[in-house]
Image (cartoon, rainbow, N blue to C red):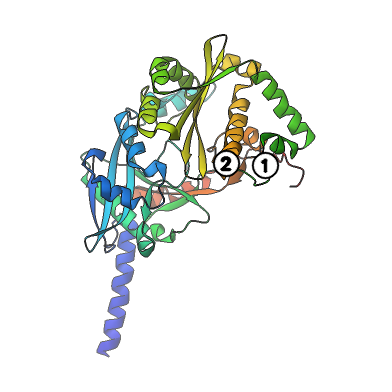
Amino acid sequence: MTIIHSIIANKLKLRWASHYSRVTGKPVPSGLSFSVYSSFTDVPSSTWNLGNLKNDVFLSSEYLSALEQAPPDNMEFRYVVFIDHNIPVGIAYFQILELDRRLHRPVHGIWSRFHDRFASHLSLRLLVCGNVLLSGEHGFMFAESHSEQALHAIAEVAFSIRRSEKRKVSVTLVKDFYDKHEYPRHILETFGYYSFDAGPNLVIPIRSNWVSFDAYLGEMKSKYRKRATSSIKKGTMLKRKSLDLDDLIKYRNEVFALYSEVVDKAKYKLFVLSPDYFVELKRKLGDLFICEAFFHEGILVGFTTRILNNEMMEGYAHGLHYSQNKTFELYQNFMLDDIRAAIDKPFLRINTGRTSIAMKSSVVAQAEDMTCYMRFSGRLSNQLLKPLFAFIKPSNEFCRNPFEDE
């Protein structure tokens, strides 16, 4: 009878521990120890670089130090090294964002008064495992031997960071997961995190039979090929120049003004890049960062950036004069130039981010679903707000199909 009582008691203990972790967000120990750093200069560089097992440029010391050198003014950073028996087995990267009305753009219409009043009082701190500056899985990396513990350890350190902050962290977000993720994600749900559809990431796979840019155009349906060639023709009126470090310093203000034209159209922003960000990327990443500028009659009218990440090209931030966009079809030329560059290298794929699904799919971008996990810090708010996650859905834009064989 004593054995039966012991078994029942252990089961009840485990159920209570699971319930307590789900409600409070405080995980049971993962079995890994960890060190948290507020500045990348304090992180042992050799340990971090060894932990970046796949040489992800967005987890590299060069990229992270560039971002820390010229960060958005509402962003702080935390860097984590996980240890098992004195051996580093994983790394993770967190951003803390201060969200307030400075990042809000007023709206007009019947709901404007309510909307603006709500936004004017909105102020919260968001803890993110990952990088809000781009889409994709760039938040952490673990040795294969510890992949089962990875997200348990992430939840554990997220709770630790949240509790150690002097100013309250309202929300914790772990981003982004492709459907074919190598880590077991269900563990986050046991700690009170809720999953939601973060919207598709638009990816352009570079086919092996695209031996040239003309081969790519040749596979398109006639109407899409005509649109592409029309955009290319308009783009011939522009002079292109790949900006080196001195050029980026010279055109710093113009580049930032063009970037601002794009981001100012957003109703609400998580961040605004620093005017020095692109300069620091070039300084730290060198040839892995490309900024291609578009000039018309000596005037800078647009730019696009690329970050080279092993076999993938990241179609990164861009900026343009919207008054010139239709004349030169700048955005379409940004995309087509990325494809041309990826074919010439060659790269296996281009990551283009989440926006402009219809336009990007017209040049062959394909949607890859992504999932994020979120929990609110308060026990009660996390339970009460759970139903809202059912309504977090990305916009349902039409995805085009430009190829004859699909």
Instruction: Determine if residue 352 is in view.
Output: yes
Amino acid of disc 1: Trp
Instruction: Determine if residue 356 is in view.
Output: no
Q: Residue at x 61, y 38 (%)?
A: 343
Residue, far top: 297
Graded by Cα atoms within 10 Å as few (under 14), some (14 to 19) or many (20 or more), the crowding at tag 2 reads some
Residue 393 occupies which quadrant of the picture?
top right
Per the model, the C-alpha gap separating discs 1 and 2 is 10 Å
- Mark number displayed over residue 13: none
Q: Residue at x 77, y 37 (%)?
A: 221
Residue, far bottom: 1
- Mark number displayed over residue 346: 2
Tag 1, which secondary structure?
A: loop
Q: Are marks 1 and 2 in contact (CB under 8 Å)?
A: yes
Amino acid of disc 2: Pro
* 199 in relation to 274, above or below: below
Graded by Cα atoms within 10 Å as few (under 14), some (14 to 19) or many (20 or more), the crowding at tag 1 reads some
Rendering coords of residue 218 (x, y %): 75, 37
Is residue 47 toward the left or the right of residue 298 in the image? left
Is 71 in front, or is 173?
71
Residue occupied by mark 1: 210
* 224 in relation to 170, above or below: above
Rendering coords of residue 327 (x, y %): 65, 15
Rendering coords of residue 148 (x, y %): 38, 64
Residue 21 occupies which quadrant of the picture?
bottom left
Residue 215 occupies which quadrant of the picture?
top right
Q: Residue at x 51, y 43 (%)?
A: 312
Tag 2, which secondary structure?
A: loop
Residue, far right: 222
Is 375 in front, or is 147?
147
Chain-order first, disc 1 or disc 2: 1
Rendering coords of residue 73 (x, y %): 32, 27
